[in-house]
């Protein structure tokens, strides 16, 4: 994967995360939402996420690179898909990650949940 493609993917993923967590952003750009959430740019906004271990290496890279250019820090805990689903459903994290989409029972416990595919892997 080329460096510029990786950076573009990271920016898109971060923008999607911000859009999903933005609530009443009112059409603000991800950078504007981060500035609003952090009180006008005096510090970095922090998002907390948890879930699948598979995407952790790429998430770490994306969040690090994005954070170098924008006032956003992401604390992601690779605790497993089930833990990510549980924590996002309970509202203890801003976003969760899972290797598979949530099932109907899980979605019923989390009205308004938004699925955003971020990483794709293959099985050999």
Image: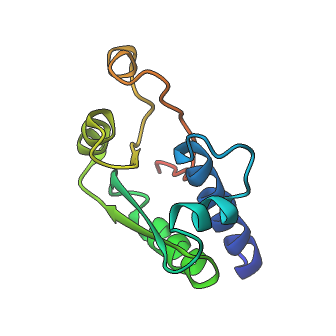
Residue for point 52% across, 46% down:
21
Q: Is residue 73 left or right of residue 53?
A: right
Residue 40 lies, in percent from the top left, at: 59, 71
Residue for point 37% across, 15% down:
108
Figure quadrant of residue 105: top left
Foreground of the two, 105 or 17: 17
Q: Is residue 80 left or right of residue 14?
A: left
Foreground of the two, 32 or 111: 32
Colour treatment of the image: rainbow
Task: Using the image, determine if residue 35 lies above or below residue 4.
Answer: above
Q: Residue furthest bottom?
A: 68
| Quadrant the N terminus occupies | bottom right
Residue 41 lies, in percent from the top left, at: 58, 76
Residue 69 lies, in percent from the top left, at: 64, 82
Task: Using the image, determine if residue 21 lies above or below residue 106.
Answer: below
Residue for point 52% across, 49% down:
122
Task: Using the image, determine if residue 114 lies above or below residue 65.
Answer: above
How many callouts does the rendering have?
0
Q: Residue furthest front?
A: 39
Figure quadrant of residue 12: bottom right
Q: Is residue 71 left or right of residue 105?
A: right
Residue 98 lies, in percent from the top left, at: 39, 42
């Amino acid at each position: 994967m080329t460096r510029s493609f990786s950076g573009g993917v990271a920016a898109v993923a971060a923008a999607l995360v911000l859009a999903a967590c933005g609530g009443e952003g009112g059409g603000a750009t991800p950078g504007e939402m981060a500035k609003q959430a952090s009180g006008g740019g005096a510090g970095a906004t922090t998002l907390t996420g948890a879930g699948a271990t598979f995407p952790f290496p790429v998430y770490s890279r994306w969040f690090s690179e994005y954070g170098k250019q924008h006032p956003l820090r992401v604390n992601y805990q690779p605790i497993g898909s089930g833990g990510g689903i549980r924590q996002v459903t309970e509202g203890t994290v801003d976003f969760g990650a899972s290797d598979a989409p949530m099932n109907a029972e899980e979605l019923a416990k989390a009205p308004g949940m938004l699925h955003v595919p971020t990483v794709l892997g293959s099985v050999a």
